[in-house]
Image (spheres, helix red, strand yellow):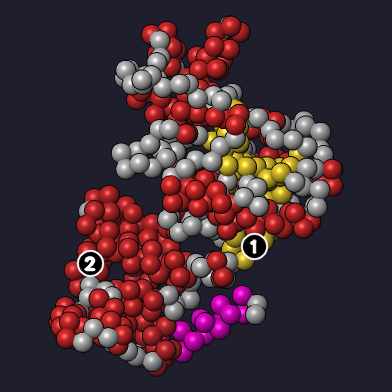
């Protein structure tokens, strides 16, 4: 079904609902409070009038200022939680007869009323879009009032279903993609900033470049996440190789390696809803079908937590057997490294490689997790840590976040499930022998 036609149909239904319920009472006069509109929406009116009420609530919410939105979230927290009398009765019924029916009744009674409210708000035209924006505002409100997290739990629960992989559509983004979508690709790029339209064209138009994005039927021209891919003859060691404006274009049929060099989540309101694992695996499978000569699938990834971790250990004795000279070298500001003499730079590069291996393979958070968020993402998807590239990103951001280090994660389609299980069940970082050789022996 054409999405423009569907949107017009939903709007017509909402307009009809306005007529059925005397919509001017709710929207024409701004006297009816938004909490009353929410109660009306939950009161069980017909579907058409429900869509109109949902639209009234969302339009009223969009008109709120920051304090008004905070008050709205507090109202959801205080007045739209579970029905406690119903919940108490369901608990007693379950205790008396712990059967499937009473378990189901208990589950329904425990659900906050605001979950059903959010479901009904989603009926409005553009409802999904506004609810994603509403969760963005909730993040800001939670910074001031962390107890609002319960509302975010409800959003995550519902979004996890509404943005299920089965609803997502994979589309290739190329230079012929409509300009309104391309503008969003420029704006949403979160890893390697796109320097205007000429830079975007270099990333999309050549035969050895690809870009793919997931879309949702309710966010037709707004990507959820996209990945940029370089088709190459080998595994690159630096982002400069990939983004070099004057590079020689490789015919796609000659490529043996697909490099996922940038993955950007586009919707802040969908934070915590995982799409990237599905995206990488599907793109790899689609590329393999298109180009049978591809036999290597890797990333060229940042290491965003490395510099912060390194600063934390530079002054600690630890068990890394670091000399005073090495500790002084690690404390050197990252920006100074580009002007070092060759011998000093070689020593520093070797040390950075060793420390990156330590960070990736042995360093853990207090709860025992791998520290780096990008590492957790790719290792959790079943990738292998393939190579550490010192000097991989000498941009200001790369130096600030990782002293210029980048890494390659390799997606071997035959080993993804085994690697995922090792990481998920034992927190094991599957790594190549080359990475493991970089580890320094720990002191006893």
Provide residue 404's location: percent of width, then percent of height.
Answer: 54, 26
**Helix, strand or loop: magenta stretch:** helix
Q: Quadrant of the C terminus?
A: top left
Q: Which residue is mark 1?
A: 170
The magenta span reads 3-17
In the image, residue 425 sits, relative to residue 432, either above or below, namely below
Q: Quadrant of the N terminus?
A: bottom right
Residue lying at 33% horizontally and 74% vertically, measured from the top left:
115
Mark 1: secondary structure: strand
Query: How would you rate the neighbour count of disc 1 (Cα within 10 Å): few for under 14, some for 14-19, many for 20 or more?
Result: some
Mark 2: secondary structure: helix
> Between 290 and 129, which is closer to the camera in this rendering?
290
Residue 204's disc number: none
Provide residue 18's location: percent of width, then percent of height.
Answer: 41, 87
Residue lying at 24% horizontally and 53% vertically, measured from the top left:
146
In the image, residue 184 sits, relative to residue 321, either above or below, namely below
Residue 103: name its quadrant: bottom left
Q: Of all residues shown, which one is farthest toward the front?
A: 444
Residue lying at 25% horizontally and 80% vertically, measured from the top left:
106
Residue 423 appears in the figure: yes
Q: Which residue is mark 2?
A: 77
Q: Is residue 233 left or right of residue 60?
A: right
């Amino acid at each position: 079904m054409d999405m423009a036609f569907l949107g017009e149909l939903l709007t017509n239904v909402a307009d009809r609902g306005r007529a059925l319920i005397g919509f001017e009472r709710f929207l024409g006069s701004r006297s009816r409070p938004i909490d009353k509109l929410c109660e009306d929406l939950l009161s069980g009116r017909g579907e058409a009038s429900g869509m109109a009420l949902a639209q009234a609530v969302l339009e009223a919410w969009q008109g709120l200022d920051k304090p008004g939105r905070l008050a709205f979230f507090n109202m959801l927290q205080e007045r739209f939680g579970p029905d406690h009398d119903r919940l108490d009765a369901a608990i007693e019924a379950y205790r008396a007869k712990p059967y499937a029916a009473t378990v189901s009744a208990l589950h329904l009674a425990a659900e906050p009323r605001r979950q059903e409210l959010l479901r009904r708000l989603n009926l409005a035209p553009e409802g999904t879009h506004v609810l994603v924006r509403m969760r963005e505002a909730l993040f800001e409100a939670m910074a001031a009032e962390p107890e609002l997290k319960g509302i975010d739990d409800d959003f995550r629960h519902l979004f996890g279903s509404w943005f299920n992989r089965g609803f997502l559509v994979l589309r290739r983004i190329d230079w012929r993609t409509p300009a309104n979508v391309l503008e969003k690709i420029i704006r949403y790029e979160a890893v390697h900033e796109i320097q205007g339209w000429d830079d975007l064209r270099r990333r999309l138009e050549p035969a050895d470049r690809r870009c793919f994005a997931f879309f949702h039927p309710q966010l037709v021209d707004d990507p959820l996440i996209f990945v940029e891919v370089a088709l190459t003859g080998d595994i690159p060691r630096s982002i400069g190789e990939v983004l070099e404006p004057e590079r020689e274009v490789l015919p796609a049929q000659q490529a043996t390696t697909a490099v996922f060099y940038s993955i950007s989540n586009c919707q802040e309101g969908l934070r915590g809803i995982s799409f990237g694992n599905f995206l990488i695996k599907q793109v790899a499978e689609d590329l393999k079908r298109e180009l049978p000569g591809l036999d290597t699938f890797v990333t060229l990834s940042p290491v965003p937590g490395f510099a912060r971790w390194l600063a934390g250990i530079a002054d600690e004795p630890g068990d890394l057997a670091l000399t005073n000279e090495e500790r002084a070298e690690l404390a050197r500001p990252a920006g100074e490294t580009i002007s070092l003499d060759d011998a000093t730079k070689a020593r520093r590069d070797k040390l950075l490689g060793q420390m990156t291996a330590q960070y990736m393979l042995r360093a853990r958070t207090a709860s025992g997790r791998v520290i780096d968020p990008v590492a957790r993402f790719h290792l959790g998807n079943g990738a292998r840590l393939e190579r550490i590239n010192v000097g991989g990103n000498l941009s200001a951001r790369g130096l600030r976040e990782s002293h210029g280090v980048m890494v390659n994660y390799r997606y071997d389609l035959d080993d993804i499930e085994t690697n995922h299980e090792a990481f998920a069940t034992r927190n094991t970082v599957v790594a190549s022998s080359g990475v493991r050789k970089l580890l320094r022996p720990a002191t006893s």
